Amino acid sequence: MRLRFWGTRGSIATPGPSTIRYGGNTSCVELVTKAGQRFIFDSGTGARPLGLDLMANAPKPIGATLLLSHTHWDHIQGFPFFIPLFIPGNRFTVCGPLGANSSLPEVLSGQMEFTYFPVELSQLGASISYRDLTEGVYDLDGVRVSTQLLNHPATALGYKIEADGVSILYLCDHEPYWENLWRSEATPGKLDSILHEGDRRHAAFMQGADVIIHDSQYTPEEYPAKKNWGHSTYSYVAKIAAAAGVKRVFLTHHDPTHDDAFLDRIEAEAREVAASLGSPLEISCAREGFEAVFEGDKATPAQAPVSEAGAHSGSLLILIVDDDEDLRLLARKALTRAGHRVIEAEGGAEGLELIAGRRPDLLVLDLNMPNIDGFEVLRRLRADEVGRSLPVIVLTAHGDEASAQSSFALGATDFLAKPFTPPQLDARVRSCFAHKIRVVSDALS
Amino acid sequence: MNSRFISNRWNCGTQIRPVRVNWTIGSKAQERQTLPTISIAVEEGMEDVVPGYLEKRRAEIPVYRRALQAADFEAISRLAHKMKGTGTGYGFEKLTELGAALETVAKDSDAPATAKYLDELALYLESVELRYPNSPG
C-alpha cells in the first residue's frame, strides 16, 4: 500500500516557517492499495492539497472511501475544500463512527451552512454515500477494514486496513485509559503487563501491525494538564506499540505549539523509550508530504468475513449503583442526554435485585458503598448466569492501581476514575457495550 | 476587573463550541465589597441540578466544622471524597481539587491543615455565583 501524509497537525492548522518540515495542515492521510482502492483517513485541512493532487494526477472518475475517525473540526475542516467532491461522476463513500450526536451528513452539512461556507453539502456534484460504522470487520471496496473504538470524549474509531500483505492502522484521537501503562510489579514491555483492560484491547488491536499512525499530541510533561482531553503522549505510543510487536510507528496529530525542532526532540525521545524496552520498533514523527510504499507477504483474506458489533440506537437500559445521590444524578443526566434510559440503586443489594429483575444492558458501579460494596457486587455478578456477561463500568473516586487491578480481576469491563465528564462517560458506555456485543457475535460465529 | 477563561475540559481537539466556563474575579456588589466573586457558567442542560448541588455543598460547611470540632476525621474524609468525585462533573473543578486535598489531610487526622482547607472551601462556596449563558434573553 502507498501511504502519504497530507496533514499531520492536531487541533488547528499551523502553517509557517516553524512547521515547514513536519507540516501545518490538520489530519489527513491517503492510503492506496496496489489494486487502486483509495482510502482517506480524516479530512482535516490536508484534504485540500490531496484533492488538488487527485485532480491533477488520479485516474478519472475519482473514487475513494473516506474513513473519519470522528467529527471534531480538525478532522473534517478540509472536507468542503476537497475539490473532487464538486465533480459529477466522482464517487465517495464517507464512513464514520456511529454514535456521534448527529448523523454524518448532518455534521458535515453543519459546517457547510451558508453562515460558514458558500456551497451546501447537497450542492456537491459527486455521488456521496454515507455509512455508520461500529466495532467490527468490514469489506469496504473489496478491502478488509477492521474498526475499534478509541478512548476519546467524542466517539472515535480506529481503523486497521489489511491489503498487499501488510496491515496499517490509523489511531486518532486516543488517550491512555490509565496513566501508567504497566502494572507496578510487572515487567515493562509485555502485553500481559498492561494494567487497564482498555489499553490491553488497544494493544491487541495493533498487535503485529506493520505500521501504525497514532495520536501523540503531548509530551509526558504536558499530559497531566491535558488529561481527559483525549490525546496520547509519545511515550505511551512507543511503549504500547513495542509491547504489541508493531514494526513501524508514525507519531501524528502534532500539537500546534510544537515546532519542527520540538518534534525532532519528540522523535528522538520516543525512539529512546522503545530502545529502553529492547524493541526494534521504528518510530518517526509524521511529516506532511512523506510518502512510502509498504508491501509484505502476510496472507490477507480475499473475501473479508464481515462482522459488526451491532448498532445500538443509544437507547440502552443502564443501571447506576452508587450511594452518592449527587453522583447518580450527574451520571443520569449524562446518560439520558446521550439517549439512554437509566435506573438507579443506592446500594449493592438493591443493585443486584434490579439486575435480576430489570436485566439492564450495562452497569455503572461505584466501589465504596456501605454493606455490599462494588467488589462484592462484581463477585456475585460474575458467579451468576444472568450477570456473567453484563458489561460493568466501575466508576469510582478510588482511582488507585490496587482498586483497578482488583476490579479487573473480578471481571470489570472498564474502570473509570472520578471525576468524570458526561461526554467521557457516554463514550466509555458506547465502547463497553460495543465490546460486549463484539465478544458475543464473535463467539456465535 | 480581572477575568480569565478556562477552556472547557469536555472539549478535545477543536470543536465549534463556545468556551463555557468563565471565572470573573473582581469586586462584587456593595454588601460584600471585600469578597471576590467567582462566576461559574452553568452548562446547558444542567440548569436544574447545579444550583441544588451548590446549595448542598454550602449546607455541608457547618457539618464539616462540627466534625472537625469532634475530631471526626472519618466523617470529613467521607464528605470530601464524595465532593472530589462530583465537583468537576457539575462544573466546579475547584471543588474536586479541594475535596481531594481535604480527604488527604483528614485521612492523616491533620487538624490544622483540615481547618485551612475548610476555610478555603467555605470562602470559595461563598464567592461562587452562577451564570446561565444559555437562558433565553
Image: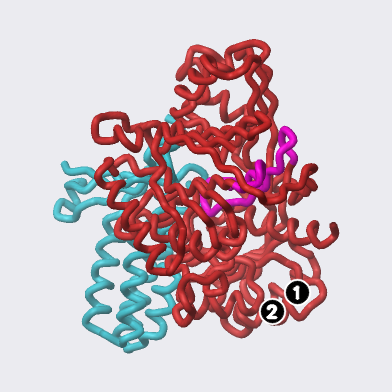
Q: Secondary structure at mark 2?
A: helix
Residue B29 point in image, percent of width and height? 21, 46
Q: Secondary structure at mark 1?
A: helix
Residue type at mark 2: give it.
Ala
Q: State whether the magenta stretch is mostly helix, strand or loop.
A: strand
Q: Tell which of A32 and A232 is nearer to you.
A: A32
Question: Which residue corresponds to mark 2?
Answer: A349
Residue type at mark 1: give it.
Glu
Is A176 situated left or right of A313 in this image?
A: left
Chain containing mark 1: A
**Does A91 lie within the magenta span?**
no
The residues tagged by marks 1 and 2 sit, at their Cα atoms, a distance apart of: 6 Å
The lab-note entry on whether marks 1 and 2 share a chain reads yes
* Residue A350 in view (yes/no): yes
Q: Tell which of A397 and A88 is nearer to you.
A: A88
In the picture as drawn, the residue positioned furthest to the right comes out as: A444
The colour of chain A is red
Q: Which residues are magenta?
A: A139-167
Q: Which mark is residue B32?
A: none
Question: Which residue corresponds to mark 1?
Answer: A353
Is A259 situated left or right of B84 in this image?
A: left
Residue at (70, 75) in percent of width and height: A350
Residue A11 point in image, percent of width and height? 39, 39
Tell me, yes or no, whether the two marked residues, 1 and 2, touch with CB atoms within 8 Å.
Answer: yes
The colour of chain B is cyan
Q: Tell which of A211 and B2 is nearer to you.
A: A211
**A11 w.r.t. B58: above or below:** above
Residue at (62, 17) in percent of width and height: A59
Is A94 situated left or right of B48 in this image?
A: right
Residue B103 point in image, percent of width and height? 36, 77
Residue A335 point in image, percent of width and height? 61, 53
